Amino acid sequence: MALAQRLEMRQGQSLVMTPQLQQAIKLLQLSNLELADYVEQELEKNPLLERDERDPGPAEESVSEPEPSPEGETLDAALSREDFSRTEDIDAEREDVYSEDSAADRGAAHVSPSDWSSLRNGPRMDEEGENALERTLAPATTLRDHLTDQLSIAALDGERRLIGAALIDAIDEAGYCRADIAEVAARLVVPQDIVVEVLRVIQGFEPTGVGARDLAECLGLQLKELGRFDPAMQTFLAHLDLVAKRDIAGLCTICGVDAEDISDMIAEIRTLTPKPGLAFGSEPVQPVVPDVFVREGADGGWHVELNSDTLPRLLVNARYFSKVSASARDKDAKNYLTDCLNNANWLVKSLDQRARTILKVASEIVRQQDGFLTYGVRHLRPLNLRTIADAISMHESTVSRVTSNKYIATPRGLFELKYFFTAAIQSVNGAESHSAEAVRDRIREMIDNESAEVLSDDRIVALLTADGVNIARRTVAKYREAMRIPSSVERRRMKVLEYGAVAGR
């Protein structure tokens, strides 16, 4: 049979990942803080975008019906039928949208600036376009800068200052020196004892405990400053592994003290700082702001609404576009304005669709987990992404993006949307499955309510099996360790120590 070449025409359907669609998908997975930063950047880049300063109405009414895209398909339909789980990185880069010498880039230079006369009374701008007030703000002091300042006033010669700078560069953000002394000495061609000598000097800097090579040394430096580093405490710090295991009897034997002294030592090291370097250059803690509110209605049902404070409200200034485009005579400038208009319209549409999708997913989660909201965590149902995706006619990868870094405020507390997706544990009699989170709550309650009898993992398995939960011992151990609950042996030792301390009083 001879091989021959021929032309064939085939018809097929596929979704083209345009930059606009990539932007819409990217917005789905952003948290409200990341979305606020993204919108701020777009407001600075696009002259046709502006904030909607009008008073917002109800969250449900602020979301308008999606308009069809130029290709004739709504964004909601595109998201519902596309499998984005196979796409590793869908964010568009600059090179994917514009070439370096594109008309959009050339036209940007020909667009005349807007009227800045209204900014006469605002902060002055320097020649580089930077805010002079912002330049006066003092940056946060980092741990490295703090240690370098102390090194500069330390009584060290030039060679030792160089060694000290190398050691400071090897100190991580927690304050521990991660450098190998032999490697530093070989690299700087100096004896190891000199490197150790300089490290001792750095360990005398503030904060106390900085420059330590392990936890025992860090705690020891702090105890030395307090005058509590006696031989018994030194031996105690050398056996922190026994402290983690709650081996009180072993610590008493090694340290040569009684159980009460060991209890006092444990209480004393709890007052110390295991990571002294975290006090410098740390990022401010951002509070969690819910994206969705769930409230109980007068009819007994659950009402779901979006948090309007986290929704960016933007408008496209069509009047400004008409005014500027009419006076623009350069073709590149007109193309630039047209691109800005299209991007602004698509961003507003994407934000609108993002709000709709979050509300749709959250409403279905509330419907599925009605028992949890009414009765508590014991009634949390097993749930996966596919169940929600099938119910709202979307792909499960889209649901996964929507539930990432999104929070919902309920009468039972503030939860991440992913909290409600739990694995299923089969029941003994083949009835309805149990949620893994509900089983973890049962294990926690059993251990909290145990009296003189300490429940082993096998005993917990037996009690859960009697309640109809088919669970293995290794699963109970895994859940217990995830909740940071000690084993039955360690809990028994803790109870003996507590009873001994009470009897001693």
Image (cartoon, rainbow, N blue to C red):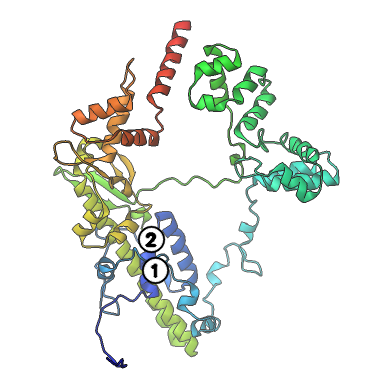
Reading the image, the residue beneath label 2 is: 312
Which residue ends up furthest to the front in the rendered image? 1
The numbered mark, 2 or 1, whose residue comes first in the sequence reads: 1
How packed is label 2: few (under 14 Cα within 10 Å), some, or many (20 or more)?
some
Q: Is residue 320 visible?
A: no
Q: Residue 414, labelled with which disc?
A: none
State the image coordinates of residue 456 (x, y, percent, origin top left): 33, 24
Viewed as shown, does residue 399 lie left or right of 321? left
Disc 1 residue type?
A: Gln
Reading the image, the residue beneath label 1 is: 23
Q: Is residue 130 above or below residue 385?
A: below
Of helix, strand and loop, which one carries label 1?
helix
Disc 2 residue type?
A: Pro
Q: Residue at x 45, y 85 (%)?
A: 335
State the image coordinates of residue 178 (x, y, percent, origin top left): 65, 43
Q: Is residue 404 above or below residue 94?
A: above
Q: Nearer the viewer, residue 295 or 214?
A: 214
Of helix, strand and loop, which one carries label 2?
loop
Which residue ends up furthest to the right in the rendered image? 157
- Of the two numbered discs 2 and 1 in the rendering, the one whose residue sits closer to the viewer: 1
Q: Is residue 405 visible?
A: yes
Say which quadrant the N terminus sits in: bottom left
State the image coordinates of residue 295 (x, y, percent, origin top left): 24, 44
Q: Nearer the viewer, residue 188 or 451?
A: 188
How many circles with numbers are drawn on the protein? 2
